[in-house]
Image (tube, rainbow, N blue to C red):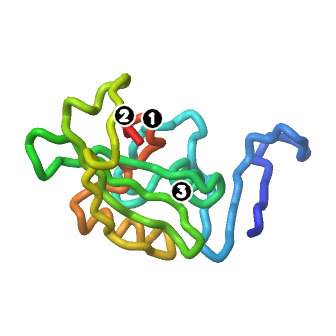
Amino acid sequence: MTVVFTVRPGQGNPSGLDLGDMLRSGVLGTADSAGRIPDAWGVRREEEDDEMRMQVANRLTMAKAGVTARIPAKDPENVAWVAVYPVDDGFMVFTVEIPEGLAGDSECFGEESIARRRLGTVRTVDEVDQVLLGLGVDPDDLDAPWHNDYPL
């Protein structure tokens, strides 16, 4: 993996606290911050409708942490999410569905209450996008699990 930091015009000489751009490249692809506004978390732009936000891609590739999004449940008495987690050979994509009454903050439930459907393991973030689009989920809806009440 290669990470390159640059200084934005008018910022002066490089220092340890630059607000410049970052380019990250590796076997899973590239991600950069050029043209992005650091404080624009959650702000969507038309040209990004079919792409994951930089923060989500960084969470998957750099932090090696999962992301989730609420999706319609197959059973009307349930709530559901799609989840993407890094694994050794790429990213595992699956759905989770639980009874709506168990989705509260203080509810405990076991494996028998969870319906999972594995959608597959893909190698790149672009392939994650394709799986999600095939499921009818906008990749921009992915976020850290605590932002959409993911219970697991």
Q: Are marks 1 and 2 in contact (CB under 8 Å)?
A: yes
Q: Is residue 68 above or below residue 92?
A: above
Q: Is residue 13 above or below residue 39?
A: below
Distance from Cα at disc 1 to Cα at disc 2: 5 Å
Count residues near mark 3 (Cα–Cα under 10 Å), then give few for <14, some for 14-19, many for 20+.
many
Q: Which residue is more in the foreground, 87 or 10?
A: 87
Q: Name which quarter of the figure residue 98 lies in.
A: top left
Q: Look at mark 3 in the image and give the residue it sits on.
A: 57
Identity of the residue drawn at 42% across and 34% down = 147
Secondary structure, mark 3, is helix
Q: Disc 2 residue type?
A: Asp
Q: Is residue 54 left or right of residue 130?
A: right
Identity of the residue drawn at 29% across and 57% down = 116
Distance from Cα at disc 3 to Cα at disc 1: 17 Å
Q: Earlier in the sequence, mark 3 or mark 1?
A: 3
- The percent position of residue 67, horizontal first and vertical second, equals 46, 50
The extreme left residue here reads: 76
Secondary structure, mark 2, is loop
Q: Look at mark 1 in the image and give the residue it sits on.
A: 146
- The percent position of residue 78, horizontal first and vertical second, equals 16, 41
Identity of the residue drawn at 26% across and 32% down = 102
